[in-house]
Amino acid sequence: MQSKQYDWQALEASALKPVHINSNEDLHSICQHWLSLPMIAIDTEFQRVDTFYPIAGLIQIGDDRQCYLIDPLKITDYGPLVEVFQAPSVLKIIHAGSEDLELFKQLMGVLPKPLYDTQLAAAFLGWGFTMGLQRLLEHVLDIKIGKAETTSNWLQRPLTNKQEMYAALDVAYLIEVCQRQIQLMKDKECYQWFLEDSVKSLEKVASADDKAEAENYYLRFSQLWNLPDYKLVGLKALSCWREEQSRVRNLPRNWLLKNQSIISIINQWPTTTGDLSRVDDMRGKNIREDGDIILTILAGAKELLAEKGTVQSIKKPLDPLWNKRFRKIKQLANEAAVEQGIAPEIVIRKKDLEALVRTKEEFGEYRIPQGLRGWRESLLGEQILAHIAQY
């Protein structure tokens, strides 16, 4: 993979005058070159102020010779780039790419694979859990880059020279950082752990389903775990409606209907427009535009319950005593992280501890949950089960 020479200083210089890809023909031509490479760096600039979905402003690529700025406002055929993104022979390198992945999935219907995230690698090297690009570059290459253009308007045209240089520099150094990180992780014998987590992260984004997410969004309202069944059905239907409409109207969730408004509606259960106007946290705009459908959803809850028969309940929050019981497990994780030289935060997460506790409800005994399988189970599984068995 690393036999080809990459000159990060040449890429840095090229960022002063990046290559613009403004047509389908230009994109097709350069993608043929990218398909021949072992790795490329990728990034995006986007705007997400008043929309549910991010709006692409730029797609940046760094290769073995140049930094490129692809203009999504002019490209209509992403087929060649999709081919690059899906090419197993081309490693795609990104930094803190969760939002970029969401944009790629929405814009092109695919995710870059295989994918290497330099932020995740930094955590496995013990440099920090959520290390920003600026700190990473200073740590690895002793280079300082600015952040002044972070909140720029990336949809304006023409972009300023400062914007273009800022965007290009975001991909100029990633290949060099990646190559150094890989060698360091191999030296520490944690590279396979990194690859395991990389695959899991990508699979999580790839498997996300809009319909399932909408139908299950109500489960996030953990404070409403003890609702009667008919109100639980109403909560599920109302939160599902908001999820679907947020996507259809391309509006942020809280612009359509705030979480607190949903909680107040379910608790107060209005049956008329007058009742709805007296619900806490309701905006007049919500009532004017969507009041009738909200009331219809609530009115149909009992009938829907009778039809469905049951609805998945919201999990009751764990007893606060578990916070104290978790301390020993967190201590074990921290000690293991120090010994391995990795960031403690990636060893074990609170949601994994909660999932561990709930395995006893499901199986009658504690079992290692999905989030702690793999290298984490090999590292700490026996100790975790031995400790929690006393409860």
Image (cartoon, helix red, strand yellow):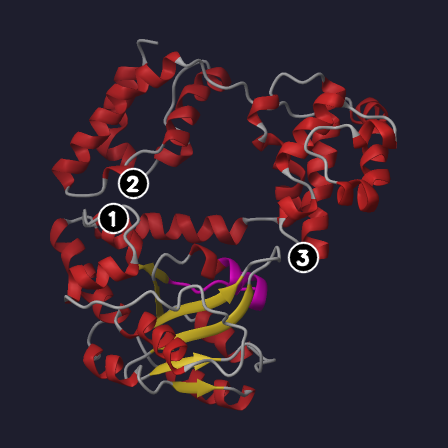
Asked if labels 3 and 2 touch by Cβ distance under 8 angstroms, the answer is no
One can see residue 329 in this view: yes
| 252 shown above or below 149 | above
Q: Position of residue 259 (x, y in %)?
A: 62, 36
Give the residue at mark 2: 346
User: Where residue 11 is drawn, which disc sits there?
Assistant: none
Q: Which mark is residue 123?
A: 1
Q: Contact (CB < 8 A) between labels 3 and 1? A: no
Instruction: Tell me whether circle 1 and circle 2 mark residues in contact (CB < 8 Å).
Output: yes
The image quadrant where one finds the N terminus is: bottom left
Measured in 3D between alpha carbons, the distance from the residue under mark 2 to the one under mark 3, in whole angstroms, is: 33 Å
> Can residue 1 be spotted in the picture?
no
User: Relative to 162, is 123 above or below?
Assistant: above
Q: What residue type is labelled 2?
A: Ile
C-alpha distance separating marks 3 and 1: 34 Å
Mark number, residue 250: 3
Q: Residues within 10 Å of mark 1 (few under 14, many from 20)?
A: many
Bin the neighbour count of mark 3 within 10 Å (Cα to Cα): few under 14, some 14-19, many 20 and up: some
The answer for how far apart the CA atoms under marks 1 and 2 are is 7 Å
Label 1 sits on what residue type?
Answer: Ala
Q: Viewer-nearest of labels 3 and 1?
A: 3
- Asked if residue 308 is among those painted magenta in the image, a careful observer would answer no
Observer-nearest of 278 and 156: 278
Whichever of callouts 2 and 3 sits on the residue coming sooner in the sequence is: 3
